[in-house]
Amino acid sequence: MINKTLKWSAFAISVVGLVGVVLVLQEFWPVDSTGLSIEHVRQKELVADFIYPSSNNALPVIVFLGGSGGGLKYEEELKALALNGYAVLSLAFFKEAGLPDKLENIPLEYFEHAFEWLKTKRQLDTNRLFLMGVSRGAELALLLGSTYPLVKGVIAYAPGCFVLPNATEIDEDTLVASWTLNSRPVPFAHIQRFEENSDASIDYIKYIDPLLKGRNDEEEYVIKVERINGPILLISGAHDLVWPSAAMANRIEERLKQRGFQHEVNNIIFENGGHDLLMFKRCYPVVSSIAFRKFSLTIRGRKYEFNLGGTAAGVIHSKVKSRELTLQFIDKYRGGLN
């Protein structure tokens, strides 16, 4: 009887182990980039990874902007996106590009230069240029789209509706602009400087909530999304614990309706989703949705932690569904705007 129990236990452990291996492999196996060309651009004025299908011409372009890290991330995801017939330019916009090593005083002209660089690539159709951003990169994508008419659409994951300052790494109480235009700070919301206990997760929501409650003086620093020259896709999680992206997405949609925006607007909010939403690999992100629920930043020499939010099942669903909805959205405009 004991031997039989041991055999069944060993069998169960083997099955669980095999399932675990399969889950890890299907999620983290590298994307087959056969058929893609990858160019690592390392110029003084531009640092980026340029990924595109090798055999295609007149490709639509997606410029990808990461979050507070500002660097070149999501390479496997962006390869998977490019395999759907898109050229993807993943931009670094911190110290890798000769810019400040923190999210402050980043000139929007740097991104304008990237747009001009894309025009030199014969395999592209820059009349179909979309921006895709995540978190602070989504704020940036919406801001750039409202500034440069060349942008024909914006996809914003966990978006912000306000222009925010660098409120984390500054040593004094005076806030610093995240973005500049024509050497002048882009007007930003004046929020409280980060003052958190490094042993606890940072709660950015409490810094943003006062902005959402106040309606009298926000026009100066709200992003003028109605100026975007094309459709907008907003994707957020109702349980985002990094910042209130769902509430800010609703504010964006409300503003566009009030101003008679003429292009398509899709505001997708996943009920049990968090801050981590982007995925283009064809997999089920079971392991990462369970194990990687937080991320850390070093702020003023100390390591702080952010809780991404969402339930494990909610994160898996939102990532899988957001891939489907995003591809449907951009595929609709593959041939240009109507």
Image: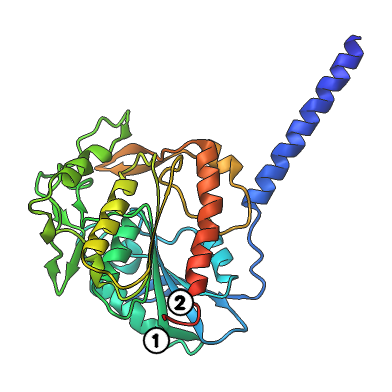
- Which residue is drawn at the image coordinates 63% and 52% (left, top)? 283
Crowd tier of the residue under label 1, counting other residues whose Cα lies within 10 Å: few below 14, some 14–19, many 20 or above: some
- Which residue is drawn at the image coordinates 9% and 48% (left, top)? 174
Q: Which mark is residue 218?
A: none
- Which residue is drawn at the image coordinates 54% and 66% (left, top)? 81
Coloring basis for residues: rainbow
Residue 183 % position (x, y)? 13, 72
Residue 161 % position (x, y)? 25, 56
Vertical position of residue 214 compared to residue 43: above or below: above
320 or 242: nearer the viewer: 320
Q: Nearer the viewer, mark 2 or mark 1?
A: 2
Vertical position of residue 210 compared to residue 197: above or below: below
Tell me, yes or no, whether the two marked residues, 2 and 1, touch with CB atoms within 8 Å. Answer: no
Q: Earlier in the sequence, mark 2 or mark 1?
A: 2
Vertical position of residue 331 compared to residue 219: above or below: below
Give the amino acid type for the residue marked by disc 2 in the picture.
Answer: Val
Work out whether residue 38 can be spotted. no
- Which residue is drawn at the image coordinates 57% and 75% (left, top)? 85
85 or 3: nearer the viewer: 85
Query: On the image, numbered disc 2 is attached to which residue?
Result: 61
Residue 44 % position (x, y)? 33, 75
